[in-house]
Image (cartoon, helix red, strand yellow):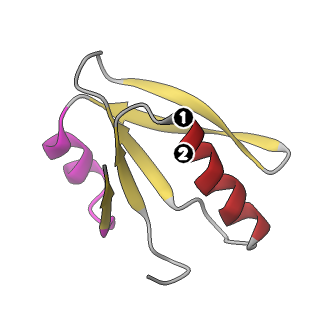
Amino acid sequence: FSPETTSIVYGLQHRAVQGMLDFDHMCKRKKPSVEALIFPFAGNHMEKFYWGTGEIIVPVYTTTQEAIAKHPGVSVFIN
């Protein structure tokens, strides 16, 4: 892992993702470590999370293939 490592999270794990983003922000990462979520039980949509005092939008995809195709720089998959 490095400060540039990014991930895709499987499932709508809001609490886990928000905890990761809070840690990223406290460590002064330049960009969030979570690039996308995968949730096969709903259509593609966006989820809002806090990034410090602001908000960011994280895309949610229904398939792993689509998420990987749209975020080729991701090197970690979190289940």
Residue 67: x and y in percent read 26, 45
* Residue 3: quadrant of the picture: bottom right
Disc assigned to residue 66:
none
Q: Is residue 65 located in the magenta-colored stretch of the structure?
A: yes
**Residue, disc 2:** 16
Marks 1/2 in contact by CB < 8 Å: the verdict is: yes
Q: Answer with left or right where residue 41 lies relative to residue 19.
A: left
Q: Residue at x 49, y 84 (%)?
A: 2
Residue 8: x and y in percent read 36, 52
Magenta stretch in the rendered image: 63-75
* Residue 63: quadrant of the picture: top left
* Residue 37: quadrant of the picture: top left
Label 1 Cα neighbours within 10 Å, binned few <14 / some 14-19 / many ≥20: some
Q: Find the distance from the CA under tag 1 to the CA under tag 2.
A: 6 Å
Residue 54: x and y in percent read 80, 42
Vertical order, 48 against 42 (above or below): below
**Residue 11 or 58: which is nearer the viewer?**
11
Q: Answer with left or right where residue 13 lies relative to residue 15.
A: left
Q: Residue at x 29, y 15 (%)?
A: 42
